[in-house]
Image (cartoon, rainbow, N blue to C red):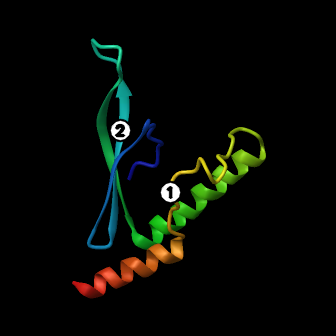
Amino acid sequence: MNHGFTYVDGIDNIVMIEGIVRFDMMTLTRGSTEKPQASRTGGIALSLPAFLRTYEQMGRVVENMAEQGMIKRKDAAQAAPAVAAPAEVADAAAKASRKR
């Protein structure tokens, strides 16, 4: 098992299939054009509980960055649409799996 780190520029696609959340990782490269081109470099598959833990951890990192002045939080009028809290996501996923 490889325990090294992999650098990615971002996530290109996120889907949930049968309770598993799958991320396509991508990197940006400059080709013959000025606009960077995204290319898939791998993927990550997380169980729903692991995805929710990751979501919470990332939220704490963002909060710490805001507290340290590294980033600015948008006010409510500028903010993106609300994202469901992890418990709401878990409830919705449980309901969806019961419908199958």
Q: How many neighbours does mark 2 have within 10 angstroms: few (below 14), some (14-19), or many (20 or more)?
A: many
Provide residue 98's location: percent of width, then percent of height: 29, 87
Query: Does residue 34 sit above or below 67 in this rendering?
Result: above
Quadrant assignment for the C terminus: bottom left
Provide residue 2's location: percent of width, then percent of height: 40, 48
Q: Residue furthest front?
A: 77
Q: Which residue is mark 2?
A: 26
- The residue tagged with tag 1: helix, strand or loop? loop
Seen at 53% across and 67% down, the residue is 53
Query: How many marks on residues?
Result: 2
Query: Does residue 31 sit above or below 53 in this rendering?
Result: above
Q: Which residue is mark 1?
A: 81
The residue nearer to you, when weighing 85 against 24, is 85
Dividing the picture into quadrants, the one containing residue 33 is: top left
- The residue tagged with tag 2: helix, strand or loop? strand
Seen at 78% across and 43% down, the residue is 68
Provide residue 93's location: percent of width, then percent of height: 37, 77
